[in-house]
Amino acid sequence: MTDTATLFAQFRAKHPGIRADYTIDQDWQHYTREEHATWRTLYGRLERLLPDYACPEFVDGMHRLDIGHDAIPEFTELSRRLGALTGWSVVAVPGLVPDDIFFEHLANRRFPAGNFIRKPDQLDYIEQPDVFHDVFGHVPMLAHPVFADYMQAYGKGGLRALKGFDKLSNLARLYWYTVEFGLIRTASGLKIYGAGIASSTAETVYAIDDPSPNRIAFDLERVMRTKYRIDDFQETYFVIDNFEQLFRETYSDFAPVYERLESGPTYEPGTVLPSDSIVHRGTGAYAAGKALSTAHQAGKSPAA
Ligand SMILES: [Fe+2]
């Protein structure tokens, strides 16, 4: 049995109605009052912060879609509003889906969103993306026509990458440093557009205000060579000038890029290169403090 088949069998045990494309009915009625209250708490905290920290396109998407101030949104209704703007829809899935399924959904302008929500004691961190991360974090930007096209192009690029290249980890870095943790220059300074930041109160403030992380101008190949942190704040954020730049620089045949990536370096998350166009050179204090405390817990000095 392949990993994919095992995953599907696990999902089917819990969701007998799961379809071959891993979608399930959202079954909005199953959410409890406590789950809607969790959404409301998370929404309320970020609603206060994001007008100052997120790019205008994100805030505009939140408002135009009326994402859901009081309760977890109903996907059919949300998709109707989103579809009218950019042709995208939101479909429910039980958790992370295999790469080919994920790319296929994006390539067809469907965003797969987890239909479950975190527990009240997981407000600040959850390992698996839940409905709050997926819908509140990702869907506002899908109302922006250029970003919506970028996401579809990413899905198509992913399907191509699966067919002839062994470069999924490089492609995942592009997604990570743009769709999840991207920053953008605006007339009023750096702002957030990445869902991983925008769905986290703490990282929203850290990504913009903290002197620790590097903020480096976006460069496709540089991004694809850079590892990322999955369990903590990022050590580096990549900054785009505008969404047209993001689309233009990534809407191309990646074959020559993949060829170059066959050799050459892979960079650690905090690396700064002489060739980088640096927006802000990070102090690295946050990551250094974490390393120190980890070493302390292990009973040794970091240099040991
Ligand atoms: Fe995400």
Image: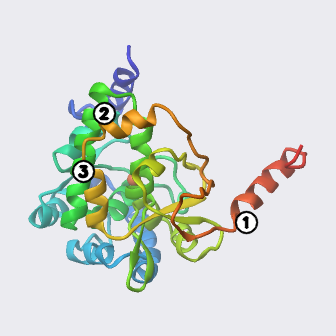
Q: Are marks 3 and 2 in contact (CB under 8 Å)?
A: no
Q: At x 9% / y 65%, what residue is drawn?
A: 84
Please say if 186 is above or below 215. Answer: below
146 to the left or right of 288: left
| Quarter residue 183 falls in | bottom left
* Frontmost residue, 36 versus 88: 88
Q: Is residue 103 visible?
A: yes
177 to the left or right of 139: right
121 to the left or right of 100: right
Question: Circle 3 is placed at which residue position?
Answer: 251
* Frontmost residue, 4 versus 186: 186
Give the residue at the far bottom of this rendering. Answer: 188
Within 10 angstroms of label 1, few (less than 14), some, or many (20 or more) residues? Answer: some
Q: Are marks 3 and 1 in contact (CB under 8 Å)?
A: no
* Frontmost residue, 215 versus 54: 215
213 to the left or right of 185: right
Which of discs 3 and 1 lies nearer the camera? The answer is 3
Which of discs 3 and 2 lies nearer the camera? The answer is 3
For the residues labelled 3 and 1, the Cα–Cα distance comes to 36 Å
* Frontmost residue, 49 versus 290: 290
Give the residue at the far top of this rendering. Answer: 1
Question: Circle 2 is placed at which residue position?
Answer: 161
Q: At x 38% / y 13%, what residue is drawn?
A: 1
Q: Residue 90: percent from the left, percent from the top?
A: 22, 54
Q: Amino acid under label 2?
A: Ala
Within 10 angstroms of label 2, few (less than 14), some, or many (20 or more) residues? Answer: some
Label number found at residue 285: 1
Q: Is residue 25 visible?
A: no
Q: Are marks 2 and 1 in contact (CB under 8 Å)?
A: no
Q: At x 76% / y 61%, what residue is drawn?
A: 289
Q: Amino acid under label 1?
A: Ala
| Quarter residue 209 falls in | bottom right
